[in-house]
Image: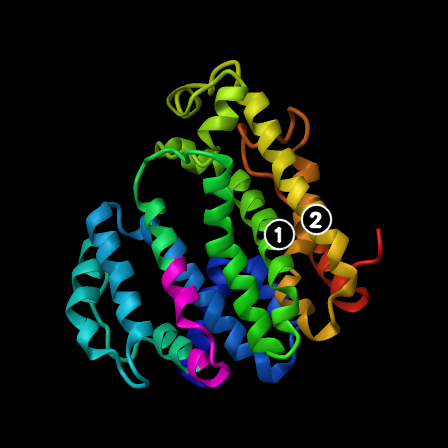
Amino acid sequence: MADDAKIVMETVRAADHDRYLTVLYAPEDKRGALFSLYAFNAEISGIRDRIHEALPGEVRLQWWRDVIAAEDGAAEDGAAEEGAAEGGAGGDGASVGHPVADALRTTISVHRLPKIAFENMLEARIFDLYDDPMPSRTDLEGYCGETAGALIQLAAMALDPVEAPRFAELAGRAGCAQAMTGLLLLLPLHRKRGQCFIPADILAAAGSSPQEFITGDGGPGAKHAVAAMIALAREHLAAFEQGAPSLPVSLRPAFLPLALSRAYLSKMVGSRHSPLHGAARLSALRRHWLLFRRATRGWPPL
């Protein structure tokens, strides 16, 4: 394996192990494309963890826009921007020959992926850099669709460009279910740093507010708000599972992360594993079994 390809793969394995496992079920000639997409997602979703100020974070997102907008070849015009952003994060500032960027440009070119989807993903990720509360359920669903939903659809297009368009709506449902599950898993981290991804209208219905939810124990309405968020994730998951039996084998790897979502959500129910107290965990053995079962059998009719 070439050094750059190994770097891209290791980026996914370290930052997003669940998605890393799903790639192993894809055809060997498609794995490089999926790793590049998931490494890109890991890079942009982790910006706040590496760059703790919003403005350098936005500069980093702009560097990625320049990378994607550029023609094939090194994105040398973005060197200064990346250096500024990585300098804020303590990085080395190197830009030319960035393994993930090079792999992503190749994937976009070879598979003719729509650049507008990446632009929308980067625009959505601006929200991560600030502490503004999520305004409404509609806003949350839009955020999830432009991040996780778009990533699933792009992976599907890389796997099977003929079949993928038929399942764009299903990718949206899958993305909402997966992203909401992920946000619940990250809820303790988000509360610690003052972020609130649970929509304000859901919090209001539970008798709480974004300000109250992120302080102390979250207030008396916190449990109800979390339960409502779990129910919303399950609603999207059920909609995905309704259509999942029709997925062709060629597209299964793109949707495989959903094999874990129901198990994560089920574990969150009840006070013992409430997202307010810590992230739900699945054993490595269970994760492997769930992925293997869906990769080999698909989703049975409900």
Residue 69 drawn at (x, y percent): 30, 74
Name the residue rendered at 41%, 58% in the picture.
121
Examine the structure image and report whether residue 117 is included in the region drawn in magenta: yes
Q: Is residue 214 above or below residue 167?
A: above
- Could you tell me the amino acid type at mark 2? Ala
Of 92 and 60, which appears nearest the observer? 60
Report the residue marked by disc 1. 173
Name the residue rendered at 67%, 40% in the picture.
234
Q: Are marks 1 and 2 in contact (CB under 8 Å)?
A: yes
Of 290 and 141, which appears nearest the observer? 141
Q: Is residue 294 above or below residue 49?
A: below
Rendering quarter of residue 5: bottom left
Report the residue marked by disc 2. 239
Looking at the rendering, the stretch of residues picked out in magenta corresponds to 107-121
- Badge 1 marks a residue whose secondary structure is helix
- Could you tell me the amino acid type at mark 1? Arg
Rendering quarter of residue 108: bottom left
Residue 140 drawn at (x, y percent): 48, 41
Rendering quarter of residue 273: top right
Examine the structure image and report whether residue 105 is included in the region drawn in magenta: no
Q: Is residue 110 visible?
A: yes
